[in-house]
Amino acid sequence: MKNWNELEKSSFFDANARERAVGLCDKGTFTELLGPHDRFESPHLPVLGTAVEFDDGTVTGVGLIGKHPVFVVSMEGKFIGGAIGEVNGAKMVNTLRLALKAAKDIKAAHADDYDARRPLVAISFETGGVRLHEANAGLLAHAEVMDAIQDCRRILPIVAVVGSKVGCFGGMGFVAAATDVIVMNEEGRIGLTGPEVIEQEMGKDEFDASNKALVYRTTGAKNKYIIGDCNYLVEDTVGDFKAALAEVADLSMEAIEKMRRIGSLKLVQEQQGLVKLVAEMQPKDSMDLWKYYGNENPAELPEMTTEEFLKVVKRRPRA
């Protein structure tokens, strides 16, 4: 693995799960929990004749950003597409529970200084969703993760980090939406149903999965940023993602709560308003929505660098 200084300058998109986990924390502070040497592997895969990974394809651990403990979950898309099953789902759940316990312990010991020491959870999503090999166990893991995220709400921030090759799809798309803050690079993608599945079920006329430009305009970070499903759009380096985490770590929980997309009647009504708008507009392309929100030349936005895009883009207004 690259040393920390090299990691900070390297591509987040190309980094593996362990490199991302190490690079999202301050230099030399990351400690892996339940790593490969602990051999926590899926008991279901050998029965099906499928190879296992000794960390079950998900890296978990804890480090620091300044005084803030950072609990990290990082998925490896090269192992079964980053899919979530019983064991790696349990690792996610217990990382969240550990972070919540740490938050309560820190608050008890440092009540006057809690905000400066408040923990943070960073989940680096690279997953197609549930591990079909494990069926109900994988679905249960999704529900338990969302329940654990809800337990942390208003106590410590949960940040979705999306910028790897597989993207974030399936049930994990719901999980990402349930976090407090979403950070993406231009290569990041979030969705519920993957492009190929949409084409298979609805036909190529509805969605052409081979049209990569269309796929990115629909599920990609620029579209998510414009419609409000992405809070931070950053350059594709591990260091830029870490800088976004550092900024979130220092925000008040009140400010973080305002970044959420779901979780209250008001936020649900906002989402319903967007659904109603799309139903009325019947847009042929996401660019129709971009223009509606004030981007006069939407076709130019996909070709812009992240820096250029952030200078000129108009976003969906929020109440």
Image (tube, rainbow, N blue to C red):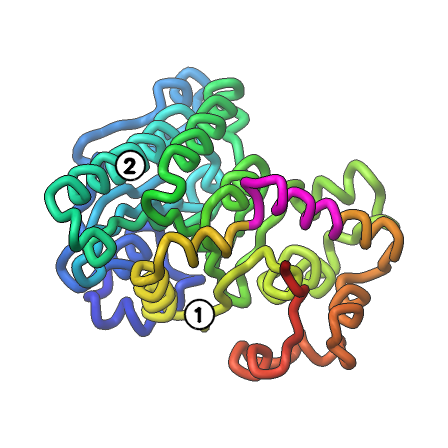
The answer to which of 85 and 265 lies nearer the viewer is 265
Label 2 crowding class (10 Å Cα cut-off): few <14, some 14-19, many 20+? many
Q: Which of marks 2 and 1 is in front?
A: 2
The image quadrant that residue 316 belongs to is: bottom right
Judge left or right: residue 283 versus residue 6: right
**Picture residue at 54% right of the left edge, 67% below the top:** 186
What residue is pinned by disc 2?
Answer: 95
Image position, residue 202 (x, y; %): 83, 40
**Vertical placement of 208 versus 175: above or below?**
below
Magenta segment's dominant SS is: helix
Amino acid type shown at disc 2 = Thr
Amino acid type shown at disc 1 = Asp
Residue 136 is labelled as none
The residue at the far top in this view is 47
Image position, residue 154 (x, y; %): 38, 44
Number of marks drawn: 2
Label 1 crowding class (10 Å Cα cut-off): few <14, some 14-19, many 20+? many
**Picture residue at 50% right of the left edge, 29% below the top:** 131
